[in-house]
Amino acid sequence: MNNDFSFDFTELRVLFEALLTPTALMGLAVLLACLALSWLVVSLLHRRVQHRATSVLFGTHVVDGVLFPVLALGLAYIAKKFLPVLGVSSAVFKLAIPVLLSLVLIRLTVRVLIAALPNSKWIKLVESKVSWLAWGGSILWVTGILPLILDEFDAITWKMGGKEVSLGALIQGAFNAVIVLVLALWISSAIESRLLRGGTMDLSLRKIAANATRSLFLFAGLLIALSAAGIDLTALSVLGGALGVGIGFGLQKLASNYVSGFVILAERSLRIGDMVKVDNFEGRISDINTRYTVIRALSGREAILPNEMLITQRVENMSLADPQVLLNTVVQVEYGTDLERLMPMLVAVVESVPRILKTPGPSVQLSNFAADGLELTIYFWIADPENGQGGPRSDVNLAILRVLNEQGIGIPFPQRVLHQAAVAGGASGG
């Protein structure tokens, strides 16, 4: 291990003197022209290309996306190569290129995380940490300290298995791995967004395609990242065996939920938007993820159910083959009521209630000779159970009550007959 660390300020002094030359002003003008041209190109594309507010390339404004610093960095690099040929100092670009490169890394990381994880609370923290690392690295690069630090890190080595590994190689590999994973996450998020916005196929099929695409890209990105970090991929066979043992013992429920999620989406037995009842919880399926399914009740409450439960337990789906749902209500009328006249009137008034289907239409049946009166059961259909079932049932009950009041037909109260036993010998006087 080399412990000698010395820094010569000659290079920094030469850079400072070059910035004070008259031709440095021309270099600054060229740099400003590169920035202006980049802003102009991105502005034109920003107006003509359709994109969302979370776009990685454009962002919410012109300069907070990835495209502006990338284009400016490319133009600055080209200008740096040609300016010495024209006799113009390129000292300004020795400062500008590290700054633009740091800006590209910050913008890329933050915009990709915003697009992939729009509701994450860690975006600001990640942005601050990435900004500190990027700006600190650019300062060390400009001052010439970064190569010395990397050389010192390369000198720190140790044995890992039968191979010698240096700290510098690990840091560079980790940096390459992060860049590869961010790019993989960006590509998968873009494909997922395009799939979920498309309207040519069912939303559940688009969801499974998006989940499979993200998993595939992240897995491929992980393999490339491990290879970039200098890790032998043949060692993954041992990791795979250990992972299999872990799944067999402690992760079997988690693995079962992931597999069940793909099965649900592939079979289309449950789809986003279906009205279901699971474990005495009724609501509409608002999202199906690879591990769990979200069911939102009409009251606003949400249930997060593991996908395995939807595979192994009974699920009532009111929207699988036909969204029409049969409802009923019960009413009693007095004995002696003319049912042949009353029942068509009830059918007609129920048909006039909003949300009640006319085909199949409502029906009225004499369901029971109750102790207090004649029991009538009114059946009716609705086609939008996701809007609630209590509303149409209440409207039907009010309509029935209105008809009974208009016809002077009473709803019998519970009646009881009391028998009083006679006292033997009569009452004795006092």
Image: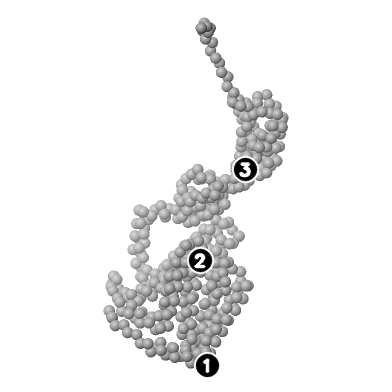
Q: CA distance from mark 2 to mark 3?
A: 41 Å
Residue farthest bottom in this picture: 87
Question: 10 Å neighbourhood of mark 2: few (<14), some, or many (≥20)?
Answer: some
Measuring 57% from the left and 57% from the top, which residue is drawn there? 203
Callout 3 secondary element? helix
Give the image quarter of residue 403.
top right
**Which of the labelled discs sits on residue 53, or is there none?**
none
Q: Pinpoint residue 268: horizontal percent, then vertical percent.
A: 54, 52
Q: Is residue 52 visible?
A: yes
Sort mark 1 into few (<14), some (14-19) or many (20+) by Cα contacts within 10 Å.
few
Q: Which residue is mark 1?
A: 86
Q: Which residue is mark 2?
A: 114
Drawn side of residue 153 relative to residue 301, left or right: left
In the rendered view, tell whether residue 63 sits above or below residue 362.
below
Q: Quadrant of residue 30?
A: bottom right
Counting residues from the start of the chain, the first of labels 2 and 3 encountered is: 2
**Secondary structure category for the residue under label 2:** helix
Label 1, secondary structure: give it.
helix
Q: Identify whether 130 is placed above or below 356.
A: below
- For residue 391, the mark is 3
